[in-house]
Amino acid sequence: MAKAICKWTKAQYVKQLDKLIEIVKEPTYICKDCGRVANDKKWLCKPEKMP
């Protein structure tokens, strides 16, 4: 299972910027805990489908 972007460190954001851009492009889910968004619920720790 992929590590939720909610748990990524700043260093991981910098190192995997291209992957992050892919993950947040055209988001369909939002994390109920921190507000981050993603296009697949597997990337968030508490995902909720966006309307």
Image (tube, grey):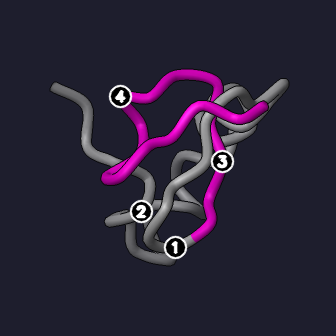
Instruction: Read off the residue under disc 2.
Output: 6
Report the side of 30 relative to 45 (left or right): right
The CA distance from mark 1 to mark 3 is 9 Å
Q: Give the secondary structure at mark 4.
A: helix
Q: Amino acid at mark 4?
A: Lys
Instruction: Read off the residue under disc 4.
Output: 42
Pinpoint residue 21: horizontal percent, then vertical percent. 74, 37
The CA distance from mark 4 to mark 1 is 15 Å
Instruction: Read off the residue under disc 1.
Output: 34
Q: Amino acid at mark 1?
A: Cys
Which residue is drawn at the image coordinates 33% and 48% (left, top)?
Answer: 4
The CA distance from mark 3 to mark 4 is 11 Å
Quadrant for residue 47, please give it.
Answer: top left
Q: Which mark is residue 37?
A: 3
Pinpoint residue 45: horizontal percent, then vertical percent. 31, 52
Disc 2, disc 1: CB below 8 Å?
yes
Pinpoint residue 36: horizontal percent, then vertical percent. 62, 59
